Amino acid sequence: MNKPQMWQPEIETLSRAEINELQNERLRETVSHIFKNAPIQRAKLEAASLTPGDIQTTDDLVKVPFTVKNDFRDSYPFGMFAVPQREIVRLQGTSGTTGKPTIAGYTRRDMVTWADLIARLATAVGVTDEDIAQISFGYGLFTGGFGLHQGMERIGVTVLPMSSGNTERQLMMMQDIGTTVLIATPSYALYISEMAHEAGIKDKLKLRVGLFGGEGCTPEMRAKIEENLGITATNNYGMCELIGPGLSGECFERDGLHIAEDHFFPEIIDPDTGKRLPYGQQGELVVTTLTKEGLPLLRYRTRDITCLYTEPCTCGRTHIRMAPTRGRSDDMLIIKGVNVFPSQIESVLIGMPHIGPHYLLLVRREGVSDTLEIKVELTDSSVLEKYSELEKIQQRIKDKLRVILGLNVKVSLVAPKTIERFQGKAKRVVDLRS
Ligand code: ZN
């Protein structure tokens, strides 16, 4: 692979001082825009006795109340917007599992920014106008499909908008068209990669790069996808409320995701106390938008757990990096007082012999005590007939999980292909306590 280029090198290599100055200037513009044009957000600032003059630099943000998902629910559908509806050219939303979706609106300028941010992260991993990208994200309200689509077109990539689902057809097109870039959630990419592996078509594929986002991806999951498809898999990150994918993405070094600091100011907070934490410490990511017109937000709580690090990256980009998200603080289970992320369990399972990457967590309450059961799929049903082998596998998983989680877990091994597959974001937890 040729060394990847930069999409906007003059911005991606700004010095720290230049970034800070740009952020402060854009923050003041954003605050002024909100005071003038976003009455619900303005009321929240006034309730905290804040005027625009109180928020001059990113340091001043610690005084500002957080914006949370409930603010969207309370002002559904357009209450958080800061421009009249005629200036909005696109609506996207979260795929909320219950109730109403969260609606995000974009102006023409927001759409240009969004496309550039996708072009930035794709260029950073070597995608060029020579590539053919198969977009296997669902199109629709979910920001993944359309978000990546417009960014790929901006680079000049040939785009195949497959959307998610119908995996056999995905694989057929991948071979016929000669797809070189696969774009999907990691869980769907894993599923596609398993099907490709089973069909023995790896050598017929021209795939070289994967752009994965929409949910976290453990290193083990990434390795499995790379092995099955013969690609370099890369992670990107975003959130509908803030813009969608494009907020951050890995460069070819794949050592953290560069955050687009000219458009966003990131902070890490302690999710319990709300206090800002220093760089390097793990906590919840909170993001302030710096250039959004349609939906500017101050201190939006993402619920994603990560940390930020400022060490220079060998790729030459100066923008701060975030660690791959460890899991949403929403997804975090508390079992017998222990914090458990599904990603921790996944990292134990992937790579174990006879074990596939598919699992389901069942949390129950028995009396006053919580129990965790993990259903794990075997790769080979013949193992189910060998009891001693089954017991050995179960014990190995239990032992590893006890070390990592400090919990005793019930492990059930089930036949191949009996756990539901996901074509969008995976749902791996069933909490029966509530
Ligand atoms: Zn880098």
Image (cartoon, rainbow, N blue to C red):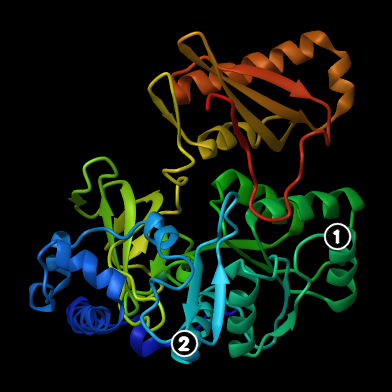
Residue positioned 40% across, 59% down in the render: 74
Residue positioned 71% across, 19% down in the render: 412
Q: Residue 211: horizontal and vertical position, in percent?
A: 61, 66
Q: Residue 234: horizontal and vertical position, in percent?
A: 57, 63
Q: Residue 153: horizontal and vertical position, in percent?
A: 64, 87
The kind of residue on which mark 1 rests is Asn
Q: Residue 400: horizontal and vertical position, in percent?
A: 54, 22
Pointer 2 residue: 107
Instruction: Quote the CA–CA distance across marks 2 and 1.
Output: 33 Å
Residue positioned 31% across, 57% down in the render: 308
Quadrant containing ligand 1: bottom left
In the image, 298 versus 45, the foreground residue is 45
Residue 245 appears in the rendering: no
The kind of residue on which mark 2 rests is Thr
Q: Quadrant of residue 192?
A: bottom right
Label placed on residue 166: 1
Q: Of label 2 and label 1, which has the lower sequence position?
A: 2
